[in-house]
Image (spheres, rainbow, N blue to C red):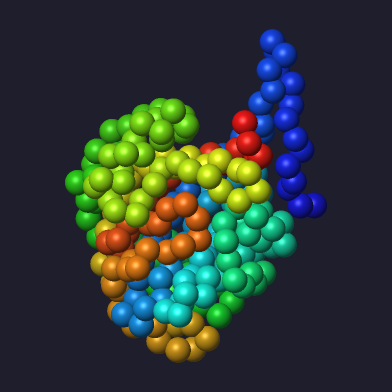
Amino acid sequence: MALRDPGPSRIPGGSRRRPRLRFEGWIAGTGTSSGTRIVLGHWRRSPFGPFSDVMLERPGGQRMLLAPTPETAEFISGTYVFDTVRVVPVDVGVADGTWTVTAGPLDLRFTTGRRRLAGYLLCAVPGALARRPAWSALTDRPARLLLPGVRTRGSAGAGRREWYGARDLRAIRAVSAFFEGADLGAAAPVEPPVRFGFGSVPRKPGVTRVSTTVVLGSE
């Protein structure tokens, strides 16, 4: 059954508060020398259970979502903007720093390198603090200054609000990617920034551990 906005709920004191959905996992972002930019969401905990999804932006600007179920496709496409949505199996394997992704027309493999300086700083942030929207609001301006295109909070589709609390960051060293059998080329900066939502992933290819909060509707 699709997850839909149930509307505001009553809380003590007579105030009204929109439901908050929590996603815990990793976001990997990389460009390729062919111009295709790829964003992988690998979620260990979510309202839909564990799942992974892929967002691609092609050189001509076409934005595509590859999601594993109709329910996840409906929710993600209601939060972000795509020209094409496909429901396909999305399988992700991680072993010894190597990620292997199979998602319909996409075959992706990449390896992670050393933790970046920002990664060491993010690891020092307690998980409970990183999950707080107030923390994401506080870090939004520094993130925009240090990582152009990156936002930690903003407005999403269907009147939703979203916050990202980063908890680690590692570089992506090497990428092998094929789309519908065509080689997408080597790893490259995510340039221009992807246009799925209010912000992009970092320009330098990397994997970020995140706690994401989505508020359904406006508060």
- Give 108 or 100, whichever is nearer the viewer: 108
Give the answer, above or below, for where 129 lies relative to 184: above
From the top left corner, tell me how far across and down residue 61 is, in percent: 47, 75
In percent of width and height, residue 129 lies at 41, 28
Q: Is residue 162 visible?
A: yes
**Residue at (38, 57) in percent of width and height:** 201
> In the figure, residue 23 lies in which quadrant?
top right
Compared with residue 38, is residue 151 higher up or lower down, i.e. above or below?
A: above
Residue found 65% across the figure and 55% down from its top? 78
Q: Which image quadrant for residue 95?
A: bottom left
Q: What is the quadrant of the C terminus in the image?
A: top right
Q: Is residue 179 above or below residue 198?
A: below
Query: Horizontal placement of 28 versus 24: left or right?
Result: left
Q: In front here: 145 or 12?
A: 145
In this view, the residue farthest toward the bottom is: 182
* Observer able to see residue 175: no
Q: Residue 92: give x, y in percent of width and height.
A: 50, 64
Look at the picture and state if 122 lies above or below 156: above
Query: Which residue is depicted at the point 63% across and 70% down?
Result: 85
Name the residue located 65 percent from the left edge and 48 percent from the top edge: 158
Residue lying furthest top: 13
Q: Position of residue 148 (x, y in %)?
A: 29, 53
